[in-house]
Amino acid sequence: ENMIDGTKILNLPVIIEELLNNRYVSFPIHVNEKDGEILDYARFTEYKGLTFSIKNNNVKLDGSLHTYHNNGIHNYNDFHFSELIDVINDISTKFSIPIERTYLNNIEFGVNIEIPFTVDELFKSIICYKATPFQKFNKKGTKGIECERPKFIIKIYDKGWQYELTSNLLRFEIKVIKMQFLKQKNVKIQTLHDLLNINELNKLKTILADVWNDILFYDYSINETDLNARERLILSNGRNPKYWENMHPDSKNFKGGATDNEYKKQRKKYYRDIDNYKKCLSVHSSSNIQKNISELIIRKCNELLFINNEIRDKCTDVLNSLKNSKKGQMYILDIKDICPIAPEVKKRVCLKCNKDISQKSINAKYCSKKCKNDYTNPLLNPRNNLINRIAKLNRHTKLFADEEFFVFTSVQLDLLNNINTINRL
């Protein structure tokens, strides 16, 4: 799956007469069967998963760019940035679409990832997103849940079930219903042309991960007999989406709006309760579902948005060909800005267990807090233990330094000369 999938364009800047005569599509005319009168209805046609509609002097375009790439059949396989370039080039060429003047009204972006358990299990553990509960999908042929916010919709569904696949294929996506949402996130995507800008697509990766991490989860494998009365109450309330919905204050309901003192007080209590719930859950839950899937989302995004010289050259060729084939249309041709070469990322591993931590912060040294503790704890690290013993002796004032009388064994010398010796002994 590519980061970009569904798109909606309410005003496609094409010449209607040319579109009606385009050799790739045909637009049936609606005729009154009784008298043969031509009816003034919108005219529709579909082509490889895209739907064109013409009404009066307006043309709309709606559909999946990914499905288009697969000739209108499906959108469950991987769809890389290089293939998105091909699709935009193809539809622009075939239908004479000036991509730099084609403004997007809705877009969908997300990833398909395989998970090691059923998607139904995941659905059960999801509570809400920022106090907004999830609802079941109503769309025929799909099984999933969605959370509707004022400017976007979070969709989580079983892609494997939709296409009768044997794998547990999870689809996680965000449907932008107001493009202002991206503007507020400092994402400069407005037109089809902007979808060729890898820098802006990379920002969508961050939005996906942030939204996923802000979803509240619950672990039903927690043994409630291990909880005290306060913890049982916290988790009982926390796993109920209605609790958060009722707890979350809306500034519109307060006289002073967002500056109202009572609103601020209730908002503070809401976030304090969220924090208490998460802390209690982390103590008693052995599940890492949310964290593990977050890592899979980032990894899949990096894979789909990978750029090398070949892809960069393809993007250059597409932009130049569009410029040469359409007189008077302006294109941004600084390919270094639109499609820069992705620097090679050196693989980084946890100092303790050698697990890949390339997806973590550049300053990260461990895959988890446990590994950090195991690595740095003097009781588990003989080298640190030996260094501390030497330092302790040196803290006492003596006529001669202790180092002059230290005699180290070969094992101790090995400890002092190697940074990580936990696994060597």
Image (tube, grey):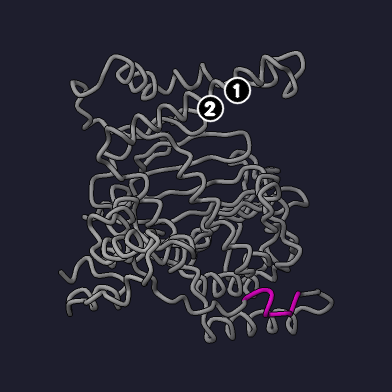
Badge 2 vs badge 1, beta-carbon distance below 8 Å: yes
SS assignment at label 1:
helix
As drawn, which residue projects farthest toward the front? 399
Percent of width and height locating residue 127: 39, 30
Residue at image position (67%, 56%) is: 187
Q: Secondary structure at mark 2?
A: helix
Asked whether 29 or 329 is in front, the reply is: 329
- Residue range corresponding to the magenta coloring: 332-339
Residue at mark 2:
271
Residue 137: image quadrant is top left
Q: Foreground: 281 or 99?
A: 281
Q: What is the distance, in whole Å, between disc 2 and disc 1 at their CAs?
A: 6 Å
Residue 346, can we see it? yes
Residue 411 is situated, as x and y percent measured from the top left of the image, at 17, 75
Q: Quadrant of the N terminus?
A: bottom left
Q: Residues within 10 Å of mark 2 (few under 14, many from 20)?
A: few
Residue 267, labelled with which disc? 1
Relative to 280, 326 lies left or right? right
Residue at horizontal 62 percent and vertical 51 percent from the top:
8
267 part of magenta stretch = no
Amino acid residing under circle 1: Arg
- Local packing at callout 1 (Cα closer than 10 Å; few below 14, some 14-19, many 20+) is some
The picture places residue 75, in percent across and down from the top left corner, at 41, 59
In the rendering, at what x and y percent does residue 333 appear? 74, 79
Residue at screen point 44% across, 59% down: 298
Q: Is residue 401 left or right of residue 94?
A: left
Q: Where, quadrant-wise, is the C terminus in this rendering?
A: bottom left
Indicate yes or no whether the magenta region holds residue 337.
yes
Tell me the kind of residue under disc 2: Tyr
The quadrant holding residue 399 is bottom left
The outermost residue toward the right is 328
Q: Is residue 307 left or right of residue 419?
A: right
